[in-house]
Image (cartoon, rainbow, N blue to C red):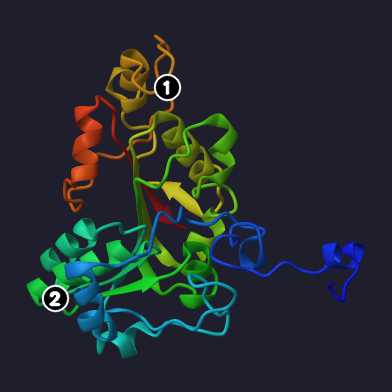
């Protein structure tokens, strides 16, 4: 028989595990930046992680779960890369296509890929190592904690959030990463004049991103007033009705950026385009 009566056991704190981290510990007040879909490594990815982890992966002291970051840990970019250079942070780097391409094209800049999906990070390490890149590091961590404590304030020149999970069902919208509570975290790490680049292929999420950043006192839209009416991707999305109700209402606000030339066309984005979904780009500057 348990030494605790039923009522007492019910009042005991629940242990925080990877399966419960979205509602406990450091994640209680802030949505996590991911959905855990599997972390097992096999074959080439397992060998890549074993061979390159110490070279390219940031060794993060954990707090309450395997993707948490201890609040006392601070990332020292100059010590890690051995130089002072602009630092670009990609949140949700996936399989690493965008960050590896950008790092190869911009050897004068340093890149930090933030991801929780371990197979994706292992795949990124394969690509980094095969190209002999020295200006990329990866970290397996929850993005809000990276932005809250791990990165020094004002230490980042650009933050990229490309195609985050759209949580397109209305009842799941609250789980989206780009929301009012997330913008101050990005603002904290960006240097004045730094850029926050975003992209999504879901029109409702695109409108939410635009609203969140447009109402923030910390950011200004680099393309304010551009691409309105028939030139707006939102107007086009309403016309095709691929991911929203059909409507003839034109977008009179605009503010959409042209497609970021520094973003390689990944298989994910290509599939979205083949499905007929409109891709939205946004660029905001830290004031």
Identify the residue shown where x is 52% and y is 54%.
183
- Pick the residue in front: 27 or 37: 37
Q: Estimate how packed mark 2 is, as few (under 14), some (14 to 19) or many (20 or more) residues with alpha carbons within 10 Å.
A: some
- Pick the residue in front: 96 or 180: 96
Residue 115 location, quadrant: bottom left
Q: Which mark, residue 147?
A: none
Q: Determine contact: label 1, label 2, CB under 8 Å.
A: no
Judge from the rendering whether residue 104 lies leftward or rightward of residue 138; answer left or right: left
Toward the top, the furthest residue is: 248
Percent position (x, y) of residue 87? 31, 72
> Is any atom of residue 124 visible in this view?
no
Give the residue number, with chain letter if any, for mark 2: 129
Judge from the rendering whether residue 269 lies leftward or rightward of residue 66; answer left or right: left
SS class, disc 2: helix
Residue 246 location, quadrant: top left
Q: Which mark, residue 252?
A: 1
Q: Name which of mark 1 and mark 2 comes first in the sequence.
A: 2
Percent position (x, y) of residue 46? 24, 72
- Pick the residue in front: 192 or 158: 158
Q: Nearer the viewer, mark 1 or mark 2?
A: 2
Locate the N terminus by quadrant.
bottom right
Seen in the picture, residue 106 relative to 174 is either above or below; the reply is: below
Seen in the picture, residue 133 relative to 101 is either above or below; the reply is: below
Q: Estimate how packed mark 1 is, as few (under 14), some (14 to 19) or many (20 or more) residues with alpha carbons within 10 Å.
A: some
Alpha carbon separation for disc pair 1 and 2 = 46 Å
Identify the residue shown where x is 51% and y is 84%.
73
Identify the residue shown where x is 33% and y is 20%.
242
Judge from the rendering whether residue 217 lies leftward or rightward of residue 34; answer left or right: right
């Amino acid at each position: 028989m348990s030494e605790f009566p039923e009522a007492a056991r019910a009042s005991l704190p629940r242990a925080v595990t990877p399966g419960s981290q979205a509602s406990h510990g450091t994640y209680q007040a802030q949505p996590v930046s991911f959905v855990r879909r599997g972390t097992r490594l096999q074959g080439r990815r397992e060998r890549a992680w074993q061979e390159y982890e110490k070279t390219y992966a940031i060794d993060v002291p954990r707090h309450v779960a395997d993707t948490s970051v201890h609040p006392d840990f601070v990332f020292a970019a100059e010590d890690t890369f051995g130089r002072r250079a602009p630092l670009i942070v990609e949140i949700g780097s996936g399989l690493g296509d965008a960050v590896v391409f950008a790092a190869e094209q911009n050897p004068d800049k340093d890149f930090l890929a933030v991801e929780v999906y371990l197979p994706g990070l292992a795949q990124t390490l394969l690509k980094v190592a095969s190209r002999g890149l020295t200006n990329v590091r990866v970290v397996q961590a929850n993005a809000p904690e990276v932005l809250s404590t791990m990165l020094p304030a004002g230490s980042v020149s650009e933050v990229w959030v490309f195609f985050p999970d759209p949580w397109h069902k209305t009842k799941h919208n609250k789980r989206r990463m780009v929301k009012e509570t997330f913008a101050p975290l990005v603002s904290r790490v960006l240097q004045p004049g730094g850029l926050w680049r975003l992209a999504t292929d879901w029109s409702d999420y695109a409108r939410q991103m635009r609203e969140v950043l447009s109402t923030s006192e910390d950011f200004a839209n680099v393309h304010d007033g551009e691409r309105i009416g028939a030139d707006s991707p939102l107007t086009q999305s309403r016309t095709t009705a691929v991911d929203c109700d059909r409507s003839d209402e034109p977008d009179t606000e605009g503010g959409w950026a042209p497609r970021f030339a520094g973003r390689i066309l990944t298989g994910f984005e290509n599939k979205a385009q083949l499905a007929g979904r409109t891709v939205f780009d946004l660029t905001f500057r830290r004031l």
